[in-house]
Amino acid sequence: MEDTEADASQGHHPTPREYVNIAIMLAILTALEVSTYFVDFGRIAIPLLIILMTIKFIMVASFFMHLKFDSKLFGRMLYGGLILALGLYAVTLIILFFERAPSA
Amino acid sequence: MSTSSETKPLRPAQETGLLSWLGTTDHKRIGVMYFFTTLVFFALGGAESGLLRAQLAQAEQNLLTEEIYNQVFTMHGITMVFLVIMPLSAAFFNYLIPLMIGARDVAFPRLNAFSYWVYLFGGIFLYSSFLLGGAPNGSWVGYAPLASDSVSNMGFYAIGLQILGISSLAAAVNFIVTILNMRAPGMTFMRMPVFVWMALVTNFLLLFAIPVIAVALFMLQFDTLFGAQFFQPGSGGDPILYQHLFWLFGHPEVYIMILPAMGIVSEILPVASKKPLFGYAAVVFAGAAIGFIGFGVWAHHMFTSAIGPVARSAFALSTMFIAVPTGIKIFNWVFTMWGGKLKFTTPMLFSIGFVSMFTIGGLSGVTHAIVPHNAQQHDTYYVVAHFHYVLFGGALFGLIAGIYFWFPKVTGKMMSEKLGKLHFWTWLLGFNLTFGPMHMSGLLGQPRRTAVLPGELGSTVELYNLLSTAGVVVLTGSALVFLYNLLHSIKRGEESGLDPWDARTLEWLTASPPKHHNFDKIPTVTHRDEFWHRKYAEDESGMPISVPAGASEDHDGEDDPDEHIHMPDNSLWPFIMCIAFLPFGYGLVFLNPWLFGLGVLWMVVGYFGWIVEPLAEGDDDDVPDDVHDRPTVGATTH
Amino acid sequence: MAADVQATTLGLDHRKLAMWTFLGSEFLFFGAFVSAYLLYITTTAGGPGVEIFDIPFTSISSFVLLMSSLTMVLAHNAHAHGDLRRMRLWILATAGQGAVFLGGQVYEFTTFYNEGLNMTQSPFASSFFVLTGFHGLHVFVGILMLLSLYALSLTGKVKANQDVKTEMIGLYWHFVDIIWVVIFTVVYLIPEIAVL
C-alpha cells in the first residue's frame, strides 16, 4: 500500500527498550523540574525550567511522534505552527503589558 | 468493483433524488450545494442591506427601531463574511481543486460533506436567532464587554461562528492535504494553476486563523453565558485582549476572502487575453507573501485603542508593506492584458472590474495605515466604503467572474452573454453609486453603526446617503438579472461544447459537466497551462499555432481508461452527525443541559456511525479516508 | 477515496498529513489561552492566586500523563509488528492513565472550588479553568478515540496491517501530552517561582 515511506523507515524506529529509556529520561527531567519547587535555585530557576520544558517537548515530538524518522514536512507543520503562535502571541502580550488599560 | 460488494451491507448508493444529495461525497455536488446555499444567504444579506439603506435614505428617519437596526447591520456583516464570501470561495475550492490538479476527489470526501453540512446548519442556527429572542446586535466584530452583555444577544454570535469555524477548519485540512498530496503525475508546485496556489495559501490562513477566533469566541461565550471574567473591566479583565484575538483572526480573514478571487481572476485574464499569465512566479510568491504578512498587520484595526505609539508605528509600517505584494499582483494582471488579444466576455469584464475596483479599495486601505489619518476615519463611513470596495468590488466581482467562467464547466451550457453584460454594467454602476459616496460622507463625519443619520451633518451628507440608497436599488435590479440569467441558462442555455473559452487548465480536459470520476485517465502533466500546451505548439517566433486537428482534441483517453477507478462511497453520516449542532448550539445558548447533552450524544453516535460504516468496496485496508474525526467543539475537529 | 493504489504525490499517508496539519494549528489554539493566562496571572480581584496550586499533586498527574505517552508509543509499536493483542493492552493502559489524569483534574478543580477559586471570580480564575479545562477536553476526546480504537480492533474493523490508525491517534495523544508539558511549566511551576 502507500506506506512505502513508513515501511522504508521502519528499520530506524526505536525498539521498545529504547522507548522505555526515553521515558526514563523524561521522568528524570520531570523530577528535576519539580525539584525547583522544593529547592531554591535562585535566578537560574526560570531559565532552567524553560530549557527542561523545551528538551522534554523535543524528545516527545522527535521520538514518540517519530518526527526524527518521518517526513520533514510533518516537522515543518508542527514547528511552523509553534513558531507562528509564539511570534504572534509574544507581540500581543508585549503590547498588552506595556499599554494595559487602567485596571479597576 | 469487487463482486463481493453485492453481498456486503452497502453504503447508500442513490444517484438521483434527495438521498443522493444528502449522502453525497462527490466534491462537485458538494461544490454545487455550497453555491446554491450561498445564493440564499446572499439574498438574505442583501435584503438586510436594503433595510439599512432604506433607513438611512434620509436624515432622522425611523423606519426601523434602533434595536432592529443593530440586529440587521450585525447580521448583514456576519452573513456576507461568513455565510456568503467564505463559502462561495469554498464552493469554488470544492468544485475546481480536484479538477485542476487532476484528481478524482478530495482527500477526505466524507469530511468534505461534513464541512458543508456544518456550514448549512451553522447558518440556519444563526438565522434562527431572529425567531428566538432576537439576532445578535453587537456588530460582526463582537467587541467585549458590550458583546458579553446580555442585551446584545451575542450568545448566538459566539456559538454560531464557532460552528462555522469547525466547518472552515475541517475544509482547510482537507484542501491542504488534497493539494499537497493528490496532484496528477507531473503537476509540480510551479505547474499548479494560480487558483490552486491561492487556494493553498487561503487554506493555510484558515488553518492558523480559525483557532484564534475559536479562542476569542470561547472566551466571549464563557463571559456571556457562564459569567467568566475574561473581558470584564470590573474585575481587572482587559477588553483589548478581545480586540487582539479578534483581529489576529480578522486580518488574515480579509485575505481569506480576497485571495480566492485573486486566484480566479488570475485564471480568467490569461484565457481572455490569449496570453500566459505575466510573471506566474511573482503572482504566486506575492500571494504567499500576502498570506504571510497578513498575519503581521492585525493591530492596524486597533489604532484608536490602547496599543501605544511604538505598536502604532510598527503596524503602520507593516500595513504599508503589505501593499507591495498586492501591487505586484495588480501590475502582473495589467501586463497580462497588455498586448493580448482581449475578448471582452462577461467573465473578463468582471475580472477587469475586480482589478480596478480592488485597486481603489486597496488605495483607500493604504490611507488607513497612516495613523493620524486613521484616527480621523475610524468608525466612519469611509471605512465602510473601503472594505466594501475590497470585499464587494474585489472579492465578489472576482467570484462572480468565476461563476460566469466555470458555469459551462458545471452545466455544459453557456450563460447569456447579453444578460451577463447587462448584469456587469448595472452591477458596476450600482456598486459605485452605493459605496463611492460613502467615502465622502465618511470623511464629512458620518459615523458607522448608527441607526439614525443625524440631521446636523448637513444636506451634503444627506445627498450622499440618498445616492447610496439609490445604488442599492440599482444593485437589486442587477442581481435579479443575474438570477434570471443563471436559472434560465441552467435550463435553456446554449450548449457550450467542451472548451468554450479556449482555456488553459486541466479542468477543461474532461467532459462538461464532468463525469462522476472526473477523468477517465489521470492526465500526466508536462507544462504549466497543460491544456493549452496540448492544443497549441509554438512556431519559431514563439507565436502559438494550433496543433494539427485530432491531436488537439485530447479529451481524453476514452480508449484507454484507467482500469480500477475507485470512487468514494456515499454516506449519510456527515449529514446525520451535523444535525447534532442544532441541539448542541441551542443547549449552549439557552443553558439547557438536556439539549446540550442530546447534541453531544448525537455527535458521539454520529461519530461511531461514521467510523464503523462499511465500505461498499469492501476493501478497507487500502482506503485512507477513514479519518477519525472527533466530534468536539471548537478548533478540535479536523 | 484514493483507493486506487496510486501513490500520493508526496508519498505520505493522507491521514497522517491531515493530522500533522491539524496539530500545527492547535498551537494557535492553546497559545491564545496561555497568553490570556499570562496576562491575567496576578489579576485575581482579591481572590486566590497561583499560591493555591498544589505542585506535588499536579506533578504526579503530569507524570502519569507523560508515562501514558510511553504506553501509547508501545501500542503503536505492537501494532506495527502486527501484534493486536499487545496493542490492545497498551491502548487500555494509555486510556486508563488518561482517565487517572482527568480524575486528578476533576479533584483539583473541586478542591480549588472549595478553597474559594471559581471561574466567575476573576480573570485569573477564568483563564486558568478554561485553559486547563480545554486541555482536559482534549484528553477526554483522546480517551474516546482510544476506546473506539480498542473496540474496533476487537470487531476486526481495525486490522493488524492498519497501524496507521493507531499511529494517528498516537500523534494526537502525544500532542496533548506535549501541550501539558508546556502547561505544567508555564502555568504551574514558573508562576510559583516568579509570582510568589
Image (spheres, rainbow, N blue to C red):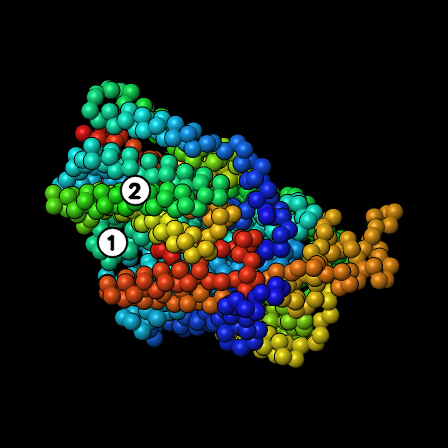
Could you say where residue B297 lies in the image, as x and y percent from the top left? Answer: 45, 43
Q: Residues within 10 Å of mark 2 (few under 14, many from 20)?
A: many
Could you say where residue B177 lies in the image, as x and y percent from the top left? Answer: 54, 50
Q: Secondary structure at mark 2?
A: helix
> Which mark lies nearer to you, 1 or 2?
2
Q: Is residue B139 shown above or below B286? A: below
Q: Secondary structure at mark 1?
A: helix
Quadrant in the picture for residue B618? bottom right
Q: Which mark is residue B454?
A: none
Q: Would residue C127 be found to the left or right of residue B34 on screen?
A: left
**Residue type at numbered disc 2:** Gln
- Between residues C73 and C103, which one lies in front from this camera angle? C73
Q: Residue at x 70, y 47 (%)?
A: B186
Label 1 with label 2: CB-CB less than 8 Å: no
Residue that badge 1 annotates: B223
Query: Between marks 1 and 2, how big is the CA–CA gap?
Result: 32 Å
Could you say where residue B53 lies in the image, as x and y percent from the top left? Answer: 42, 70
User: Marks 1 and 2: same chain?
Assistant: no
Q: Which mark is residue C97?
A: 2
Q: Chain of mark 1?
A: B
Quadrant in the picture for residue C155? bottom left
Q: Chain of mark 2?
A: C
Q: Is residue C105 shown above or below B423? A: above
Q: Would residue B235 be found to the left or right of residue B259 on screen?
A: left
Q: Would residue B163 be found to the left or right of residue B7 on screen?
A: left
Q: Is residue C152 visible?
A: yes
- Between residues B601 and C117, which one lies in front from this camera angle? B601
Q: Residue at x 81, y 60 (%)?
A: B552
